Amino acid sequence: QVTLVESGGGLVRPGGSLRLSCTASGSIFSINAMGWYRQAPGKGRDLVARITTSGDTSYADSVKGRFAISRDNAANTVYLQMSSLKAEDTAVYYCNLDNFRGGVIWSKYWGQGTQVTVSS
């Protein structure tokens, strides 16, 4: 079992910045990916950004150039630096961890979610 604890959400004005953090504890495999998904009211949960233990990253097209994901492997922590925020970035942001074994996702875990609201 893995526990994910998120922090850093809140209210920010359009054009502002926020940094989300997520720390994992428990049965974390040596090969894993950590990332952030978001879910706006009435919509599905979509990938925002993801980073593997080797540092490979992927981003949703809508956040490329504005958001940056990073991680501290020793601390099992992933960060999402969000800049130039827009109203459409408003959502609940969920931290995710995928454990890999044999090249496939062996187990998947989610945080409780943190609200990000972009509004003037």
Image (cartoon, grey):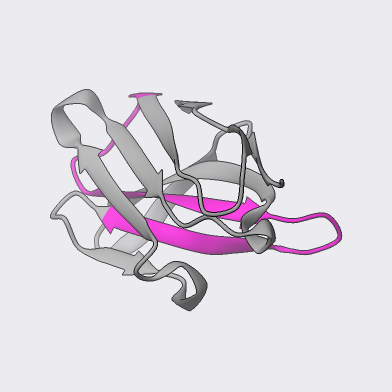
Q: Is residue 6 left or right of residue 14?
A: left
Residue visible at 30% across and 31% down in the picture? 77
Reply above or below: 87 against 24.
below
Residue 12 drawn at (x, y percent)? 60, 39
Up the image or down, 66 lies above or below 74; here it is below
Residue at the spot x=38%, y=71% of the render? Answer: 64
Our reading of the magenta stretch's main secondary structure is: strand
* In the foreground, 99 or 54: 54
Per the rendered image, the range of residues in magenta is 25-51
The x and y percentages for residue 34 are 36, 47
Question: Which residue extends farthest bottom?
Answer: 61
Q: Give the image location of residue 4, x and y in percent.
A: 47, 28
Apparent side of residue 99 relative to residue 112 in the rendered image (left or right): left
- Report the residue that reaches farthest toward the right: 42
> What's the residue at 41%, 31% (across, down)?
22
From the top left corner, tell me how far across and down residue 109 is, in percent.
Answer: 51, 40
**In the rendered view, would you say 68 is above or below 62?**
above
Q: Quadrant of residue 43?
A: bottom right
Question: Magenta segment: does it hold 76?
Answer: no
Q: Quadrant of residue 19?
A: top left
- Quadrant of residue 52 in the image? bottom left
Q: Front-most of 118 and 45?
A: 118
Q: Nearer the viewer, residue 47 or 101?
A: 47
**Residue most extreme to the front:** 120
Q: Which residue is pictured at 34% across the width and 28% down the height?
A: 27
Tally of numbered tags: 0
Q: Is residue 34 left or right of residue 7?
A: left
